Amino acid sequence: MFGGNMQVAIYARVSTKDKGQDTENQLRQLRDYCRKQDWPITTEYIDRASGKRGDREQFQAMFAAASRREFDCVLFWSLDRFSREGTLETLTHLQRLTASGVAFKSFTEQYLDGTGIFRDAIIGILAALAKQERVRLSERVLAGLQRAKAQGRVGGRPKVNRAGDPDANQIRKLRDDGQSYGDIATELGRSKADVYRVCMTLGCLAP
């Protein structure tokens, strides 16, 4: 389906938790592979962030460029370098590329190659895995609700007084200063979802 002088974008990522690692090891192999295939590299997108987040800066920049067809294929070292958000989210990312007419290819996983005739089969397999993941998630949620009901709770989560949260005043101040939920969570050592719930209680959701 793709061939010749295919224009390629490289995506590389290491986590902030990967101590002593950098993307150069990935990039060196990916560049060498493109050179051997005679594939021009248009852009290199490099993130140092958790693969469990889809809002990575360079990751999103790559999709924006893909929608403009600035390249024909995204090459990454392995699928877990591309995304670690789970099967469903990863499938959605690959489908976004495909919908833009852009292929995908894993350097270390030869079966994960969207440049050939088996692209639709690969997407189909991932879709089946994503469906199973959704079923398992639904089963876990249902089990949690049943357990909560047995314990006399409604909705599976005990009520928490967010307005009385010890960080409430600080969170409100940081939101008033224009900081994002993620930035506040990092500064206070809290989860982003927890910060959002406090803001919802305090009525300071708007930027």
Image (tube, grey):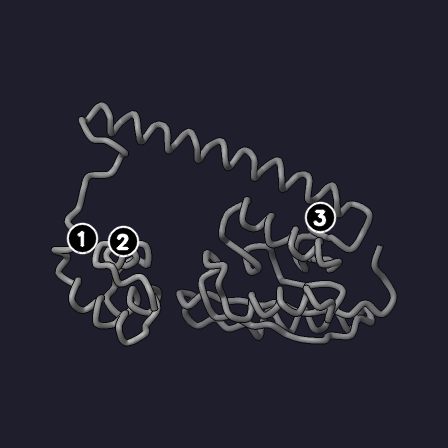
> In the image, 189: left or right of 14?
left
Q: Marks 1 and 2: CB-CB under 8 Å?
A: yes
> Which of marks 3 and 2 precedes in the sequence?
3
**Residue at 18 percent of width and 42 percent of height:** 159
Residue linked to disc 2: 197
> In the image, 164: left or right of 149?
left
Which amino acid type corresponds to the residue marked 1 in the rendered image? Arg
Q: Position of residue 60 (x, y in %)?
A: 56, 66
> In the image, 40: left or right of 28?
right
Q: Position of residue 165 (x, y in %)?
A: 15, 57
How far apart, in angstroms, are the residues tagged by discs 3 and 1? 48 Å
Dot label at residue 162: 1
Q: Secondary structure at mark 3?
A: loop
Q: Position of residue 175 (x, y in %)?
A: 28, 69
> Which of marks 2 and 1 precedes in the sequence?
1
Dot label at residue 111: 3
Q: Quadrant of residue 50?
A: bottom left
How far apart, in angstroms, are the residues tagged by discs 2 and 3? 42 Å
Quadrant showing the N terminus: bottom right
Quadrant showing the C terminus: bottom left
